[in-house]
Image (cartoon, rainbow, N blue to C red):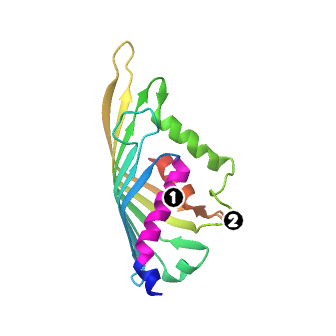
Amino acid sequence: LAIVFVSIDAVAKQGVERGARFALQVPTTLDSADVKVFGGSFGMQGLEVKNPEGFSAPHFLQMNSAGVNVDLGSLTADVVELPELTISGIDMYLVKEGGKANYQVIMDNLKRFESGSKEPDPSKPGKKFVIRKVQINDVTVHATVLPIGGAANTVELKVPEIVLTDVGSGGKSASMAEVFNIVIKAV
């Protein structure tokens, strides 16, 4: 039991990185995860999703922090119920280089979930999630635009808030990779 409590943050960090890497098919790192078992909360800081190979932007997506409160009873179940997931400080680069767009490569990677692909190893099913509300705050998107007859420019777009409801509900709970798919598409 003591080993579980000592290593739970590292296990959660690894699960988030693995789910994002599987969903997006690009290197993904997380600075830290903080699981408060008795407090019923989970937080993470410093998620970075690299660009697909061949793109020079600093990253595809960075996220400052995310947090959620969870019903302790659902942690032992196969499906974890989350009343609200709050994500803050998203910085995203949408670029086009060499006739390809980084976001199109990422979106093509995410299409696997629409065709019914499952987790990387079906013999080791992971937790599934139902999230009643996803609140995304402070989004900055740097997008390359190509004006007619001109050179490419980068514009910056700020989105103060995005809200999603009932993610993974309707009898179809979502894996960590599927949650990434839904959030990335929303942003």
Q: Secondary structure at mark 2?
A: loop
Crowding near the residue tagged with mark 2, few <14, some 14–19, many ≥20 C-alpha atoms within 10 Å: few
- State the image coordinates of residue 104 (x, y, percent, origin top left): 51, 35
Q: Is residue 170 magenta?
A: no
- State the image coordinates of residue 64 (x, y, percent, origin top left): 32, 56
Name the residue carrying label 2: 123
Residue 174 or 157: which is nearer the viewer?
174
Residue lying at the far bottom of the rendered structure:
1
Q: Which residues are magenta?
A: 7-24
Q: Name the residue at 46% across, 58% down.
A: 17
- The amino acid beneath tag 1 is Arg
- The amino acid beneath tag 2 is Ser
133 left or right, relative to 170: left
Q: Is residue 13 magenta?
A: yes
4 left or right, relative to 109: left
Q: Name the residue at 49% across, 79% down.
A: 71
Name the residue carrying label 1: 18
Q: Name the residue at 40% across, 42% down.
A: 60
